[in-house]
Image: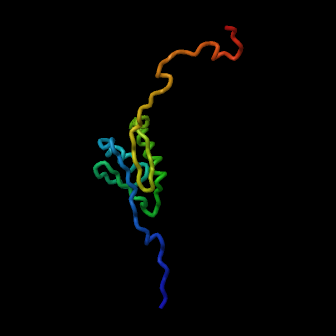
């Protein structure tokens, strides 16, 4: 009796890439539509989570590809300045950017000329 080898692509189990939207739940359908057009896959929206299959028609979709297209979608929706896209294995999180106080906005005074000029200042 002869056993024929099985094709590896038939045995692969389709897993999902999860995208956690967090604060962007309202924009979930718009983001899913943009990602679906760019990645050519059907994306399911479950509350604050997008579920993206990592294989479609034999073509493998990587997490890096999804992250890049997610950045494009956020830019298209004019949200790229307010949110970061973080990746952890098969999970992508969208996190709101925290405001940082810049040193120029802190105020203060200019240093005295003796500290800022390169030559000797008698004084």
Q: Is residue 56 above or below residue 106?
A: below
User: Which residue is drawn at the image coordinates 31% and 48% (left, top)?
Assistant: 48
Q: Position of residue 44 (x, y in %)?
A: 32, 54
User: Which residue is drawn at the image coordinates 35% and 46% (left, top)?
Assistant: 21
Q: Position of residue 76 (x, y in %)?
A: 41, 38
Q: Quadrant of the C terminus?
A: top right
Residue furthest out toward the front:
123
Question: Which sits in the foreground, 63 or 58?
Answer: 63
Residue furthest out toward the bottom:
1
Question: Which sits in the foreground, 119 or 66?
Answer: 119
Tag count in the figure?
Answer: 0
Residue furthest out toward the top:
123
Q: Position of residue 89 (x, y in %)?
A: 45, 56
Give left or right: position of 9 versus 49.
right
User: Which residue is drawn at the image coordinates 36% and 45% (left, top)?
Assistant: 31
Q: Quadrant of residue 98?
A: top left
Q: Position of residue 99 (x, y in %)?
A: 42, 32
User: Which residue is drawn at the image coordinates 71% and 15% (left, top)?
Assistant: 119
Q: Is residue 98 above or below residue 14?
A: above
Give left or right: position of 54 versus 109.
left
Q: Is residue 62 above or below residue 21?
A: below
């Amino acid at each position: 009796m002869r056993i024929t080898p099985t094709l590896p692509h038939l045995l692969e189990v389709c897993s999902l890439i999860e995208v956690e939207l967090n604060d962007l739940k309202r924009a979930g359908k718009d983001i899913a539509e943009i990602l679906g057009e760019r990645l050519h896959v059907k994306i399911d929206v479950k509350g604050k989570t997008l579920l993206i299959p990592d294989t479609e028609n034999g073509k493998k979709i990587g997490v890096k590809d999804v992250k890049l297209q997610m950045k494009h979608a956020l830019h298209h929706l004019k949200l790229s300045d307010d949110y970061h896209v973080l990746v952890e294995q098969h999970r992508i999180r969208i996190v709101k950017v925290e405001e940082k106080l810049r040193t120029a906005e802190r105020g203060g005074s200019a240093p005295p000329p003796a500290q800022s000029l390169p030559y000797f200042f008698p004084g």
